Image (cartoon, rainbow, N blue to C red):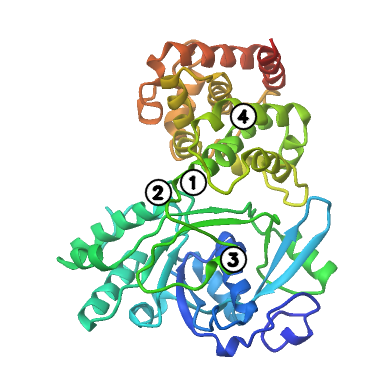
């Protein structure tokens, strides 16, 4: 059965019981992709489903697309009246499905930028949220006259200032350390260029809370669409698939009120930093610790590699001995349980996340997620062998040829620089880490270089699996 408002009553899975026609827009979201629909939109759907006086009806979401690629999402959501299916893949192989109804409208900005600006400027819009990726916050080359997230929002803020209206809260949901501060810097910089003096008003009126978001959400494949139809009887042009686990930690700092997010399972805190570090240095860095060794060992799916006892032991030892000592206290979190759960999440066969996805864009990920762990431990005298081995596995992967001699498609924004360096490292073992743009001064640290070159030599001589086995033996000695 095709998914739409007219068929919703007959759809044979969990679905909204609230009247979507009565839901007003209180949140405008830029970047309606898989993660937003599996995460923030799901939390808002939970709130609306509660239907109590605290959750209210004024917190529906209007998605906004800006990029040419967003045209498809506009067409799909228009055809399905904003509805889509969230399919959860449980570790035991079972699945749960629910139709999400919290996106009550979607606007494609290039078609009518004025309509988007007026929606953003409306007093009923109290939160503007974003998943635009880290690169989306680079405002240096954005023309103020172009249709962009920043141009639209800043123009709307100027109108709200001129009309004497409260400022909305701007909430970044991107996987960036200090995402609220990143958003604040980008929007105020753009505002000062486009409307001199507006940045001062924003400084006094606009809040940018930091947040930590977490839910593994692989890309929607034709197989997902087929499974939804065959198993649940729902025809959805663009469902989203995710793991059951989800987390959203959000600083409780809002300009003009907020819905009771805590009722839907959001953790509201004064400072998100400890939770952010926990996720970046445990989950994200562990993904990097896994992916290059896994690819070189012949794995192509994350759950297959994480289900291998050798890889699971390697990840747990990295988390226990190198990452955890660098964390701040994390109130309300059972860290040993969190780490065990991470391994279980990685090994969930239903998610079918790919090793190649984890290997993508390493020159952006490694410096932000793993190298801070290395630097803290170098300064404190803590262990760095496993982190150094992960860097070595990336360097070996970046050579662009696997252990069977087959080519590796190295997808990285710095591939043109890093691949030649990696291929030079058999003659010059530190060639890769001498790139100071990525590694800073790590190549001058004797302790790091010793651990790194041992692992790189082992990778060249014995291969990825044997290197991991030797690392685990060394830890036992």
Instruction: Classify the position of the C terminus by image quarter.
Output: top right
Q: Element at badge 3?
A: helix
Are the residues tagged 1 and 4 within 8 Å (C-beta)?
A: no
| N-terminal label among 1 and 2 | 2
| N-terminal label among 1 and 4 | 1
Q: Element at badge 2?
A: loop
Q: Element at badge 1?
A: helix
- Residue linked to disc 3: 37
Are the residues tagged 1 and 2 within 8 Å (C-beta)?
A: yes
| N-terminal label among 2 and 4 | 2
- At x 70%, y 46%, the residue is 345
- Residue linked to disc 4: 320
Are the residues tagged 3 and 1 within 8 Å (C-beta)?
A: no
- Residue linked to disc 1: 276
What whole-number distance in Å separates the C-alpha atoms at marks 3 and 2? 22 Å
- Residue linked to disc 2: 178
Q: How many other residues sit within 10 Å of disc 3, few (<14), some (14-19) or many (≥20)? A: many
Q: In the image as oriented, which residue stretches furthest toward the left?
A: 196
| Image position of 166 (left or right of 60) | left
Q: How many other residues sit within 10 Å of disc 1, few (<14), some (14-19) or many (≥20)? A: many
Image quadrant assignment for residue 154: bottom left
| N-terminal label among 3 and 4 | 3
| N-terminal label among 3 and 1 | 3
Instruction: Classify the position of the N terminus by image quarter.
Output: bottom right
Vertical placement of 473 versus 312: above or below? above
Q: Position of residue 392 (x, y in %)?
A: 55, 22
What whole-number distance in Å separates the C-alpha atoms at marks 3 and 4? 33 Å
What whole-number distance in Å separates the C-alpha atoms at marks 1 and 2? 8 Å
Residue 42 visible to the viewer: yes
Vertical placement of 243 versus 30: above or below? above
Are the residues tagged 3 and 2 within 8 Å (C-beta)?
A: no
| Image position of 48 (left or right of 2) | left
């Amino acid at each position: 059965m095709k998914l739409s408002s007219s068929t919703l009553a007959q759809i044979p899975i969990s679905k909204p019981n609230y009247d979507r026609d009565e839901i007003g827009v209180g949140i405008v979201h830029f970047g309606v992709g898989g993660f937003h629909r599996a995460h923030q939109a799901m939390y808002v759907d939970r709130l609306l489903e509660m239907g109590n006086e605290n959750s209210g009806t004024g917190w529906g979401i209007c998605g906004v697309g800006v990029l040419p690629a967003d045209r498809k999402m506009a067409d799909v959501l228009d055809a399905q009246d904003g509805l889509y299916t969230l399919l959860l893949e449980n570790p035991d192989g079972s699945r749960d499905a629910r139709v999400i109804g919290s996106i009550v409208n979607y606007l494609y900005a290039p078609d009518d930028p004025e309509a988007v600006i007026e929606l953003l400027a409306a007093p009923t819009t109290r939160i503007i949220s974003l998943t635009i990726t880290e690169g989306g916050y680079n405002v240096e080359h954005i023309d103020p006259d172009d249709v962009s997230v920043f141009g639209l929002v800043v123009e709307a803020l100027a109108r709200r200032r001129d009309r004497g209206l409260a400022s909305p809260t701007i909430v970044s949901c991107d996987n960036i350390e200090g995402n609220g501060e990143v958003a604040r810097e980008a929007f105020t910089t753009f505002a000062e260029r486009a409307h001199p003096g507006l940045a001062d008003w924003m400084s006094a009126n606009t809040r940018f809370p930091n947040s930590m978001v977490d839910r593994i959400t692989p890309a929607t494949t034709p197989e997902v669409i087929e499974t939804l139809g065959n198993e649940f009887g729902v025809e959805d042009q663009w469902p989203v698939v995710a793991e059951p686990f989800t987390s959203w930690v959000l600083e409780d700092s809002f300009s003009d009120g907020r819905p009771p997010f805590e009722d839907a399972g959001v953790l509201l805190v004064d400072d998100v930093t400890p939770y952010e570090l926990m996720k970046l240095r445990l989950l994200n860095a562990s993904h990097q610790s896994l992916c290059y060794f896994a690819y070189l060992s012949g794995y192509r799916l994350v759950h297959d590699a994480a289900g291998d006892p050798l890889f699971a032991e390697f990840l747990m030892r990295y988390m226990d001995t190198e990452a955890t000592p660098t964390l701040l206290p994390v109130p309300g979190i059972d860290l040993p349980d969190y780490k065990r759960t991470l391994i279980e999440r990685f090994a969930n066969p239903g998610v079918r996340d790919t090793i190649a996805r984890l290997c993508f864009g390493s020159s952006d990920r490694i410096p932000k997620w793993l190298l801070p762990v290395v630097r803290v431990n170098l300064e404190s005298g803590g262990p760095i062998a496993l982190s150094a081995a992960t860097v070595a596995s990336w360097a070996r992967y970046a050579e662009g040829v696997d252990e069977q001699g087959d080519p590796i498609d190295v997808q990285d924004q710095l591939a043109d620089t890093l691949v030649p360096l990696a291929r030079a490292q058999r003659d010059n073992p530190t060639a890769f880490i001498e790139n100071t743009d990525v590694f800073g001064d790590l190549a001058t640290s004797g302790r790091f270089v010793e651990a790194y070159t041992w692992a790189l030599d082992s990778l060249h001589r014995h291969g990825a699996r044997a290197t991991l086995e030797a690392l685990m033996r060394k830890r036992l000695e």
